[in-house]
Image (tube, rainbow, N blue to C red):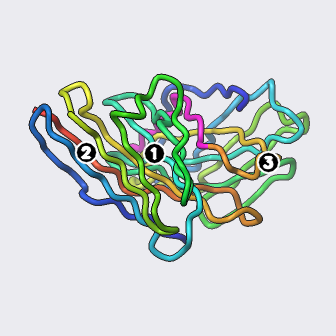
Amino acid sequence: GAVVSQHPSWVICKSGTSVKIECRSLDFQATTMFWYRQFPKQSLMLMATSNEGSKATYEQGVEKDKFLINHASLTLSTLTVTSAHPEDSSFYICSAREPPGLPYEQYFGPGTRLTVT
Amino acid sequence: DAKTTQPNSMESNEEEPVHLPCNHSTISGTDYIHWYRQLPSQGPEYVIHGLTSNVNNRMASLAIAEDRKSSTLILHRATLRDAAVYYCILRDWTGGGADGLTFGKGTHLIIQP
C-alpha cells in the first residue's frame, strides 16, 4: 500500500520558538493532504486540508497564522507551528489521499510528537 | 459525515474471533462505511470499507446490516498485534473523498494472551 512519512518523529522545543513538521507521500502523488492533532487519550481532530499549489483550508477554531501549512509539491506538505506554547504539545499526524477515482482510503503518516517546554 | 456509535472498549482472547460493532442509524444512501485502526503511538491505518455488501480483505471482514444502520468489523483470529483503537467512520462518496476524516472515540480493543 501507499506510504506516508513524517519528519521528525518527535521534537522538543522551547516556548516561543517555531517548529516545522514534514509530511511526504513516498510512492504516490498526493494532491490533497490532511493534518490532524491528537491530545493524550483523545481522538484525532482534523486541523486543516492542504491542497497542492493553493492555500490550505483550516477547520473552525484552528488559527491559520499559528499553524502554517505549505503544500509546494505533489509529495510534500509542511506544517509549521509558530511561536509554540506548552498547550501546542500534541501528536501531529498527516494523511494523504490518491487522486480521485481510486479507493478513498487515506494513508496516514506515523505521527510527530511535539513537546513544548 | 453522519454520526457513528461504538462501544468504548472490548476485550478478547488471542487467537479467537473478534466482532466490533458500530451503529450508524442516520447513514445516508451515499455513505460508505470505513474502518481504521490506530495502534499505540502510531498514525491510523486503513482496515476496510464497504457500501452495502459484506466485504473481505486480508485484514478483516465487514458485515453490513441489510438496512445499513449498523455494521460489524470481524477479526477472524485476533493476535496481540491487533490491540488498537478501532474507528468506524462514514464517508460520503459523492465528495470524492476530498474531505478529512471525522474520528469518533472508537473502540479500544484489548487482546489477552
A108 inside magenta stretch: no
Q: Where is residue B60 shown, x and y percent of the image?
A: 63, 57
Q: Is residue B93 above or below residue A29?
A: above
**Which stretch did the figure color magenta?**
B100-113
Residue at 77% over, 42% down? B92
Residue at mark 3 to residue at mark 1: CA–CA distance: 21 Å
Q: Residue at x 13, y 44 (%)?
A: A12
User: Do the residues indicated by labels 3 and 2 lie within the same chain of the protein?
Assistant: no
Q: Which residue is mark 2?
A: A113
**Would residue B83 appear left or right of A16 to someone viewing this image?**
right
Q: Residues within 10 Å of mark 2 (few under 14, many from 20)?
A: many
The three-letter code of the residue at mark 2 reads Arg
Residue placed at 12% from the left, 32% from the top?
A: A15
Residue kind at label 3, given as amino acid type: Trp
Position of B109 relative to B8 (above/below): below
Mark 1 vs mark 2: give the one in front: 1
Q: Which residue position holds label 3?
A: B93
Residue B13 is situated, as x and y percent measured from the top left of the image, at 46, 45
User: What mark, if any, has residue A35 been given in the picture?
Assistant: 1
- Residue at x 25% of width, y 55% of height: A9
Mark 2 — on which chain does it sit?
A
Tell me the subunit letter for badge 1: A
Question: In the drawing, does residue B64 fall left or right of residue A117?
Answer: right
Q: Element at badge 1?
A: strand
Query: Where, by quadrant of the figure, is residue A114 drawn?
Result: top left
Q: Taking B111 as reference, is B99 left or right?
A: right
Q: Tag 1: residue type?
A: Trp
Q: CA distance from mark 3 to mark 2?
A: 32 Å
Q: Kindly indicate whether the residue at mark 2 contacts the one at mark 1 (C-beta within 8 angstroms).
A: no
